[in-house]
Image: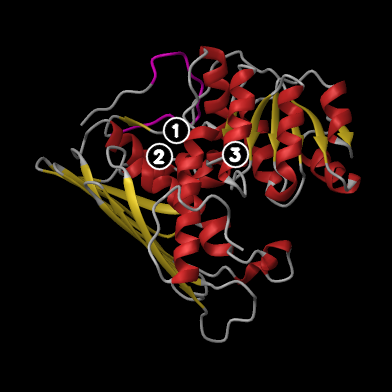
């Protein structure tokens, strides 16, 4: 079983030939145009850990709370400049990349300002609250010949990256069925801003799975989405912690279940069937997964190296840098990401109404 990666020079500590499948984060050698990070909340430590380990320069850290920026700077980039106003950072720093890691409700103006300043942008996920506004940003970037990418870091989680690359290489033929289930405890959000995200599970969390299902069924087009959500017994926080989704494709089907109040024996499972084989992953969580690929030749379990957090974040920035250096389309560009958001919005609307929806018919994140 073999698969081929981009033949351009890469530097990666976890580029592995697991059955010939190259799945580790990759990025071009000797290309470090400088990064400006806007938003220094809890997730940013994973961004900065990945960038530091890759040897990339973070020129500036921006947050309305100066102490938040200073705290992460002291741990990861002590020489980075600190700003509380992103406009000042954009005007005073020559870094070519802006990593926008704020919440989505304030993100659009920041992205537009960064693009206006001539910077390429990596937006945190979920990208936007409105598909039409997202399309306007995409067109704004394209008109300026700038890259606008979305931090769908799950694509570079070792198990997901192996699976999508094995599928892209045709190792299991054309895929036609995907089953994805996650059973875990998400009540850690109590007391944080995430506790007030109404569609926490299907929006903020499951956007990774909506994005991945498109990668796992790359030759199929989603036609219909049906979903439901509910409350788990004794749950205390506001967002529904139970969710399930069925997606019809023109020549495939997918199902996803999310049980987010499981306090014992957590499990994260993905199963994908193709015309020539099956690839599946299983583990106690997204950081601890094993993959098995089965065809007529037999079964194989690659030894995966790396972890979603923080290698996934190195993968997204590496992909953006590679696309800039090679002047090629970016695989995580925002236009592509709108297709994942369209699945997400349709699922949330379906859960609210009990009716199926066509992806793209629901233009805004439902209230």
Vertical position of residue 253 compared to residue 274: above or below:
below
| Residue at x-position 57% and y-position 17% | 324
* Most frequent secondary structure within the magenta stretch: loop
Residue 11 sits inside the magenta stretch = yes
Residue 306 pos. (x, y %): 48, 41
Give the camera-side residue of 127 and 161. 127
Could you say which disc has been placed on residue 161 in the image?
2
Secondary structure, mark 2, is helix
Can you tell which quarter of the image residue 270 is in?
Answer: bottom left
The residue stretch that appears in magenta: 6-18
Q: Earlier in the sequence, mark 3 or mark 2?
A: 3
Query: Relative to 258, is 56 on the left or the right?
Result: right
Distance in Å between CA atoms under marks 2 and 1: 7 Å
**Disc 1 residue crowd, few under 14, some 14–19, many 20+, Cα 10 Å:** many
**Disc 3 residue crowd, few under 14, some 14–19, many 20+, Cα 10 Å:** some
Residue 158 pos. (x, y %): 43, 42
| Residue at x-position 62% and y-position 15% | 31
Secondary structure, mark 3, is helix
Query: Relative to 117, is 52 on the left or the right?
Result: left
Distance in Å between CA atoms under marks 1 and 3: 29 Å
Q: Quadrant of the N terminus?
A: top left
Distance in Å between CA atoms under marks 3 and 2: 26 Å
Residue 169 pos. (x, y %): 26, 30
| Residue at x-position 65% and y-position 64% | 197
| Residue at x-position 59% and y-position 48% | 126
Residue 102 visible in the shown view: yes
Residue 159 visible in the shown view: no
Give the camera-side residue of 308 and 133. 133
The residue under label 3 is 134
The residue under label 1 is 24
Secondary structure, mark 1, is loop
């Amino acid at each position: 079983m073999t698969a081929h990666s981009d033949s351009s020079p890469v530097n990666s500590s976890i580029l592995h030939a697991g059955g010939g499948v190259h799945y580790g984060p990759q990025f071009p050698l000797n290309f470090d145009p400088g990064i400006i990070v806007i938003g220094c909340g809890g997730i940013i430590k994973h961004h900065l850990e990945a960038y530091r380990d890759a040897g990339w320069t973070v020129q500036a850290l921006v947050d309305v709370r100066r102490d938040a920026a200073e705290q992460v700077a002291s741990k990861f980039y002590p020489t980075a400049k600190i700003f509380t106003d992103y406009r000042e950072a954009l005007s005073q720093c020559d870094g070519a990349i802006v990593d926008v890691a704020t919440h989505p409700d304030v993100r659009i103006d920041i992205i537009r300002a960064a693009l206006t300043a001539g910077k390429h942008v990596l937006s945190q996920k979920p990208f936007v609250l409105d598909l039409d506004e997202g399309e306007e940003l995409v067109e704004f970037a394209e008109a300026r010949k700038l890259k606008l990418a979305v931090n769908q870091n799950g694509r570079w989680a070792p198990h997901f990256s192996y699976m999508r690359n094995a599928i892209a290489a045709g190792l299991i033929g054309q895929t036609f069925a995907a089953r994805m289930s996650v059973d875990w405890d998400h009540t850690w959000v109590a007391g944080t801003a995430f506790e007030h995200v109404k569609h926490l599970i299907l929006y903020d969390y499951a956007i990774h799975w909506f994005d991945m299902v498109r990668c796992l069924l790359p030759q199929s087009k989603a036609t219909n989405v049906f979903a439901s959500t509910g409350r788990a017994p004794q749950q205390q926080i506001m967002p529904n912690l139970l969710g399930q989704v069925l997606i019809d494709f023109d020549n495939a089907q997918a199902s996803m279940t999310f049980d987010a109040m499981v306090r014992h024996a957590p499990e994260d499972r993905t199963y994908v069937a193709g015309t020539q084989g099956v690839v599946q992953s299983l583990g106690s969580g997204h950081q601890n997964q094993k993959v098995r690929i089965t065809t007529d030749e037999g079964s194989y379990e690659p030894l995966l190296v790396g972890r979603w957090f923080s290698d996934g974040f190195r993968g997204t920035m590496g992909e953006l840098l590679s696309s800039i250096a090679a002047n090629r389309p970016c695989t995580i560009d925002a236009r592509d990401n709108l297709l994942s958001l369209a699945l997400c919005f349709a699922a949330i609307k379906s859960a609210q109404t009990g009716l199926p929806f066509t992806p793209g018919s629901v233009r805004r994140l439902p209230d």
